[in-house]
Image: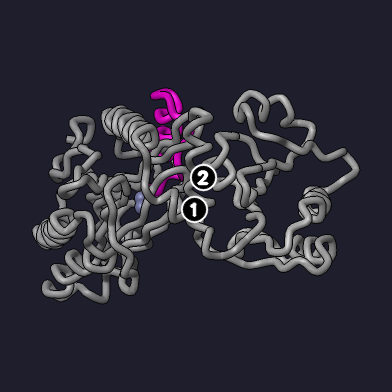
C-alpha cells in the first residue's frame, strides 16, 4: 500500500468520526491497523488524532518494519518492561484528550480498565464497526489483490483436482490444497480448507478427517481460498466435486442451489440491500421446500479478513456499493445425505456486479476419478 493511500484512509476515518466529537480514536483491531497504516505486523495499535496527528504504539521488534512500511507515520516504541496496554494508557494520557474513541469489538475489558485509570477524567467512547465500514468498499489496489487471491486459489484447485484418487482422505486433500496454494504464490490458505465427503458435507464447517475417504461417497465438498502476500487479501470459494455416480435427486438439489445462486448474483447491484440479495437466493430454496435446510446467511464481504462487512443476511438493511466484494454461497444441508454449497466471489460495480471466480460448476468427475 502506498503511504498516500493510507493517509487518505485515515482522513476518511477522521471525516466519518467528526460527529462523535473525539480528540482521538484508538484502533486496536490489528487488521484495522494494517488497513490504516500498511503495517503488516501485529501487537501494534494506532491513535488517529482529530487534528491529523496519528501515532502508532508498538515494540522494539517492529521499529525498523514500521519505518519501512509506514513512512511518515509517527511511532512510539514502548520499552521492554512496559506492556502494550500500559503504553496505550500512558500515550492516551499524554494526548490530553477529553474524549477518546475505542473499538468496542476488539479492546479487552482489561485494557479498558487500564486506559480508564490512565486518562483520569477523560471519557472513553465505545464505537463499533467504524473502520470496518470503510474497509467494506475496496479501492483499485485491493480489488487487484483479491483478483490475485482468486487466481491463486483457482490454479491450486485445478492442480489438486488432477491428482485426486479414491483412497485419499479428506485430510490428504486439504493438505494437498494447502501445499498447492503456497506453490501457486499464496502466503497461506485464507482459512483451513474444508473438505467433506458425502454426508459429512451436511456440516457447513466440517473439519477434514483422516478416516473419511473420497471412495466413501459419490461427491466431496471443498471450501477453500488463498491469502496474498505481502498483505493477506483473501479469496473464498466452494465447489462440489462428483467423485462417483451421484443420484438424480442429488443433481436436482444441486440445480436448486445453482438457481438460487444465479438469482442472488442477478440481484447484486449498488443500492440493493444486503438482505434483499439473501432473500433472492433464499426464496428459490424455500419455494423448492428446502428452506429449513439453508441454515446460514447468503454471504459475506472478503478482504484482509475472510469474513468482513457487509454481511448478506436477513435483517441487514445496509445498501451495497460499488467496490464491495462479497461471497454468494447458498447451501442446502440434509443430515441424511449430505450438504451442497456453491460459493463465488462477486465485485459490486457501478451498474451491477462482476463475478470474479470462474471455476466450472458442472458435476463432471475429474479425469483421475473417471
Ligand atoms: Zn468459503
Ligand atoms: Zn464464505
Q: Position of residue 367 (x, y in %)?
A: 18, 31
Name the residue carrying label 2.
11
| CB contact under 8 Å: marks 1 and 2 | yes
Magenta residues, as a range?
Answer: 173-195
Name the residue carrying label 1.
15
Looking at the rendered structure, the secondary structure element under dot 2 is helix
Q: Image quarter for residue 336?
A: bottom left
Q: How crowded is mark 2: few (under 14 residues within 10 Å), some or many (20 or more)?
A: some
Q: Position of residue 22 (x, y in %)?
A: 63, 60
Q: Image quarter for residue 254?
A: bottom left
**Could one spot residue 153 in this view of the protein?**
no
Residue at (16% x, 59% y) in the render: 267
- Residue 91 vs residue 105, the one in the foreground: 91
Q: Where is residue 316 in the image (x, y as percent from the top left)?
A: 34, 69
- State whether residue 92 is above or below residue 44: below
**Could one spot residue 313 in this view of the protein?**
yes
Horizontally, residue 123 falls left or right of residue 319, namely: right
Amino acid at each position: 500500500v502506498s503511504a498516500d493511500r493510507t493517509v487518505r484512509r485515515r482522513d476518511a476515518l477522521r471525516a466519518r468520526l467528526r460527529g462523535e466529537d473525539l480528540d482521538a480514536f484508538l484502533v486496536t483491531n490489528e487488521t484495522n491497523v494494517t488497513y490504516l497504516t500498511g503495517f503488516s505486523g501485529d501487537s501494534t495499535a494506532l491513535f488517529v488524532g482529530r487534528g491529523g496527528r496519528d501515532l502508532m504504539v508498538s515494540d522494539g521488534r517492529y521499529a525498523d518494519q514500521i519505518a519501512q512500511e509506514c513512512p511518515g507515520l509517527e511511532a512510539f516504541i514502548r520499552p521492554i518492561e512496559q506492556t502494550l496496554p500500559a503504553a496505550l494508557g500512558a500515550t492516551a494520557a499524554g494526548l490530553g484528550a477529553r474524549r477518546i474513541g475505542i473499538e468496542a469489538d476488539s479492546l479487552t475489558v482489561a485494557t479498558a480498565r487500564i486506559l480508564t485509570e490512565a486518562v483520569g477524567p477523560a471519557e472513553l467512547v465505545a464505537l463499533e464497526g467504524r473502520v470496518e465500514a470503510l474497509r467494506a468498499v475496496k479501492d483499485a489496489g485491493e480489488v487487484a489483490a483479491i483478483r490475485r487471491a482468486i487466481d491463486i486459489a483457482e490454479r491450486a484447485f485445478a492442480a489438486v483436482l488432477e491428482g485426486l484418487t479414491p483412497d485419499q482422505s479428506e485430510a490428504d486433500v486439504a493438505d494437498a490444497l494447502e501445499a498447492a496454494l503456497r506453490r501457486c504464490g499464496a502466503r497461506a490458505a485464507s482459512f483451513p480448507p474444508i473438505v467433506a465427503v458425502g454426508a459429512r458435507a451436511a456440516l457447513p464447517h466440517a473439519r477434514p478427517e483422516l478416516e473419511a475417504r473420497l471412495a466413501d461417497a459419490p461427491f466431496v465438498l471443498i471450501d477453500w481460498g488463498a491469502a496474498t502476500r505481502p498483505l493477506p487479501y483473501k479469496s473464498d470459494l466452494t465447489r462440489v466435486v462428483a467423485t462417483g455416480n451421484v443420484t438424480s435427486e442429488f443433481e436436482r438439489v444441486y440445480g436448486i442451489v445453482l438457481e438460487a445462486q444465479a438469482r442472488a448474483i442477478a440481484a447484486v447491484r449498488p443500492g440493493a440491500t444486503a438482505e434483499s440479495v439473501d432473500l433472492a437466493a433464499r426464496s428459490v430454496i424455500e419455494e423448492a421446500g428446502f428452506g429449513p435446510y439453508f441454515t446460514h446467511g447468503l454471504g459475506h464481504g472478503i478482504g484482509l479478513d475472510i469474513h468482513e462487512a457487509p454481511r448478506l443476511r436477513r435483517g441487514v438493511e445496509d445498501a451495497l456499493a460499488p467496490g464491495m466484494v462479497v461471497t454468494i454461497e447458498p447451501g442446502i444441508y440434509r443430515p441424511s445425505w449430505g450438504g451442497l454449497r456453491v460459493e463465488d466471489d462477486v465485485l459490486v460495480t457501478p451498474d451491477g456486479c462482476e463475478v470474479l471466480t470462474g471455476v466450472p460448476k458442472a458435476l463432471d468427475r475429474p479425469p483421475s476419478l473417471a
